[in-house]
């Protein structure tokens, strides 16, 4: 592995605020069995600085000289194959001391870069299994830091999970297999607005903390002064914190030494179990992590017995990300609910309400239910034909209609998807050069992703007739095979929602929000990028830029008000420009426009509204944007069954799919839209 010159870091003890984050990092350093920490928060909140500075306050570790895996010479069971062989021959050298490494795993890292690969040249010439170590090798006995962990490709995440669970990384490349130890403290950071993590990966993180920008003016001023002083003279600034760094390092060493002596009572273990059951946490890792964390907190504070306060702190760190049961629920613990559970005496049978958090006592939600009924009554009064919300001052926020189970939605793969690759889960693709999982080999006219193992097998019968003094195998350029890879791609799905006053009639907006919600749940599982354009009044707004955060899309949808006139052309134009920008940034994503409106446009840019809409529709066709139209108009408004809106016209002009919301259930809408996407892509 190549190592770059180390830049001086701001000392760990000099980082201002974010005490919970720093404590979670220290607890994992003392007890790696906790399982790492996931740090959620916006950029610029000292996440990366704290992780990189952590290594400087950790004890030095003993390693075998020259070992690429930093093996511990005192732990024979954890030695790599090379060190184990030397140990058997009594040739294992002495030891060196080195600082714990913080190894960064870039978001765009390929599987070969993460796992490592086999040095084929040495294998052919010298007949040995020579490993070219990857990131997991470098991270052994260190800290594996993944910034933007929520944006990793799925197949890289799967490899990472296997190594984290087993403590061993197995490299299987070019027909050769090699294993090495890979035990590390897993630290991930993420911005929730950029998308969520898979539940399987969430559960692998022992602890979770959320960080926010500091609001205290004095603390923010102190941060500015710290950064300026450090930038002016890093070495001089670091000297100021030398004693603080030494003190925290000593505290860590004592905690590591005392940790095996810390005990926890059966009563507190039972309390941890009861709290997990009461909060609806299904994974058994929760209780295990809580107990380990509570013991570590006690050791860090210099005590040998876990207290109830230790247990509560541990629960607040270990539970939030494991409580997440629906895509749009924020992962956090209600302090009052936690207090109630902590103070509740243990019982043999807590009853059905304890085991089913969905059926909690009614008194907590009675006020909410009354408010809901009042809102519903007012909506019913306001939805009369005489009240169409045409004035901007009459804007209201409508509830979301009933969602559907997204598992019922099945997607049909199309031929055009085979050549697209972008991180996601909706459609299988052929992957890209060096992206995706290696599944086979084929001949291609160009490419640098050579399948050496398959090539060697293919040319081996001809080697008896080819002689070379320097080469073990002679391969002609036209015999090279390229790797076939499988990946998955996603869509850039932009919802264009009519938020004008006419959508308040006959609960059109509630039905429209219900349809969008159904598709959002499906997009959550498939890691689509989603966005939201709303048009009302005199123009259109990009309410949510295209993002991987389905949670954020849901929140914006919930808050979307209704009222005003219907500038349909402005909504389509805003959608076109947004998707064109996205296509330039992510060429492999499939652009999809889902228009939900009653089509009753009454605001234009000065010309004829129909001509403006037709012109934008032509632009959508030229841009290869798949357009789907969901018409919310109930029909037969004048008694003659005449269609008053532009929805059929837009669908026809864009060669898109047209659906009537009044004829479909929410489930039918979801299935129809997605099948419409597949059918449309077949033609592109």
Image (tube, helix red, strand yellow):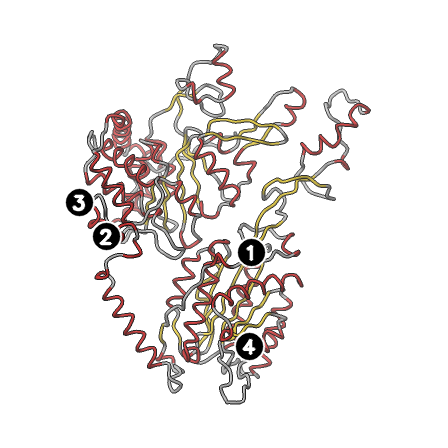
Tell me whether circle 2 and circle 1 mark residues in contact (CB < 8 Å).
Answer: no
Residue 2 versus residue 194: which sits nearer the camera? 194
Mark 2 lies on residue: 337
Query: Are there few (<14), some (14-19), or many (20+) residues within 10 Å of tag 1?
Result: few
Q: Is residue 52 above or below residue 95?
A: below
Quarter in which the C terminus is drawn: bottom right
Q: Which disc is residue 345 wearing?
A: 3
Which of the marked residues, 2 or 1, is nearer the chain's N terminus? 2
Mark nearest the camera among 2 and 1 is 2
What is the x, y in percent for residue 55? 36, 32
Give how far apart the Cα atoms at labels 4 and 3 are. Answer: 61 Å
Q: Position of residue 123 (x, y in %)?
A: 64, 23
Q: Residue 585, labelled with which disc?
A: 1
Distance CA(mark 3)–CA(mark 2): 14 Å
Left or right for 458, reference 347: right
Judged by depth in the image, the label closer to the viewer, 4 or 3, is 3
Q: CA distance from mark 2 to mark 1?
A: 45 Å
Instruction: Tell me the residue at 31%/56% (across/down).
Output: 358
Q: Residue furthest right?
A: 465
The residue tagged with tag 3: helix, strand or loop?
loop
Q: Residues within 10 Å of mark 2 (few under 14, many from 20)?
A: few
For residue 673, side relative to residue 236 (left or right): right
Task: Please tell me whether mark 4 sits on a helix, a strand or a loop.
Answer: helix
Mark 2 to mark 4 CA distance (whole Å):
49 Å
Q: Are marks 4 and 3 in contact (CB under 8 Å)?
A: no
Q: Is residue 572 above or below residue 295?
A: below
Q: Earlier in the sequence, mark 3 or mark 2?
A: 2
| Secondary structure of the residue carrying numbered label 2 | helix
Q: Which mark is residue 647?
A: 4
CB of mark 4 within 8 Å of CB of mark 1?
no
Which numbered disc, 4 or 1, marks the residue closer to the eye? 4
Circle 1 SS class: helix
């Amino acid at each position: 592995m190549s190592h770059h010159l180390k830049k001086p870091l701001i000392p760990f003890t000099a980082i201002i605020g974010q005490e919970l984050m720093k404590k979670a990092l220290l607890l994992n350093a003392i007890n790696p069995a906790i399982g790492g920490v996931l740090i959620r928060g916006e950029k610029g909140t000292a996440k990366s600085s704290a992780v990189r500075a952590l290594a400087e306050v950790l004890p030095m570790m003993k390693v075998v000289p020259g070992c690429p895996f930093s093996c511990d010479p005192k732990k024979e069971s954890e030695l790599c194959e090379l060190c184990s062989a030397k140990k058997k021959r009594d040739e294992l050298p002495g030891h060196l001391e080195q600082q714990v490494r913080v190894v960064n795993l870039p978001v765009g890292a390929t599987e070969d870069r993460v796992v490592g690969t086999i040095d084929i040249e040495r294998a052919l010439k010298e007949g040995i299994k020579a490993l070219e170590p990857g990131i997991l090798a470098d991270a052994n006995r260190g800290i594996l830091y993944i910034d933007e962990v929520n944006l990793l490709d799925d197949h890289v995440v799967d490899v990472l999970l296997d190594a984290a669970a087993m403590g061993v990384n197995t490299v299987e490349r070019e027909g050769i297999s090699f294993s090495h130890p890979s035990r590390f403290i897993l630290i991930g950071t993420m911005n929730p607005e950029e998308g969520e993590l898979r539940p399987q990966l969430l559960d692998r993180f022992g602890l979770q903390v959320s960080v926010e920008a500091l609001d205290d003016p004095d603390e923010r001023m102190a941060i500015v002064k710290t950064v300026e002083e450090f930038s002016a003279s890093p070495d001089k600034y670091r000297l100021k914190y030398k004693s603080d760094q030494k003190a925290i390092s000593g505290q860590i060493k004592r905690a590591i030494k005392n940790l095996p002596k810390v005990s926890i009572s059966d009563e507190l273990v039972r309390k941890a179990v009861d709290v997990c059951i009461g909060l609806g946490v299904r994974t058994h890792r929760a209780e295990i992590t809580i107990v380990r964390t509570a013991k570590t907190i006690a050791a860090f504070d210099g005590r040998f017995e876990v207290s109830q306060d230790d247990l509560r702190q541990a629960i607040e760190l270990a539970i939030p990300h494991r409580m997440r049961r629906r895509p749009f629920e924020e992962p956090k613990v209600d302090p009052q609910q936690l207090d109630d559970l902590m103070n509740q005496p243990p019982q043999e049978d807590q009853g059905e309400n304890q085991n089913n958090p969905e059926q909690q006592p009614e008194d907590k939600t009675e006020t909410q239910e009354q408010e809901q009924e009042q809102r519903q009554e007012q909506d019913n009064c306001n939805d009369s034909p005489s009240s169409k919300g045409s004035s901007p001052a009459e804007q209201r926020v409508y509830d979301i209609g009933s969602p559907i189970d997204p598992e019922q939605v099945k997607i049909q793969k199309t031929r055009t998807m085979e050549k697209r690759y972008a991180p996601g889960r909706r459609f299988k693709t052929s992957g890209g050069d060096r992206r995706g999982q290696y599944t086979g080999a084929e001949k291609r006219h160009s490419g640098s992703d050579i399948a050496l193992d398959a090539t060697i097998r293919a040319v081996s019968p001809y080697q008896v007739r080819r002689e070379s003094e320097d080469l073990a195998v002679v391969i002609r350029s036209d015999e090279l095979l390229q790797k076939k890879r499988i990946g998955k791609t996603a869509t850039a799905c932009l919802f264009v929602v009519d938020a004008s006053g006419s959508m308040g009639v006959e609960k059109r907006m509630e039905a429209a929000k219900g349809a969008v919600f159904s598709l959002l749940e499906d997009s959550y599982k498939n890691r689509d990028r989603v966005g939201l354009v709303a048009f009302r009044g005199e123009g259109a707004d990009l309410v949510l830029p295209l993002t991987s955060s389905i949670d954020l899309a849901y929140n914006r949808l919930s808050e979307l008000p209704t009222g005003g006139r219907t500038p349909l052309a402005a909504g389509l134009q805003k959608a076109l420009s947004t998707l064109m920008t996205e296509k330039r940034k992510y060429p492999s994503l499939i652009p999809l426009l889902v228009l939900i409106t009653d089509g009753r446009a009454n605001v234009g840019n000065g010309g004829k509204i129909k001509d403006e809409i037709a012109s934008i529709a032509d632009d959508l066709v030229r841009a290869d944007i798949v357009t789907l139209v969901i018409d919310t108009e109930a029909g037969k408004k004048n008694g003659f069954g005449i269609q008053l809106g532009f929805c059929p016209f837009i669908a026809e002009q864009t060669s898109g799919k047209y659906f009537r919301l009044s004829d479909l259930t929410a489930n039918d809408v979801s299935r129809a839209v997605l099948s419409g996407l597949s059918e449309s892509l077949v033609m592109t």
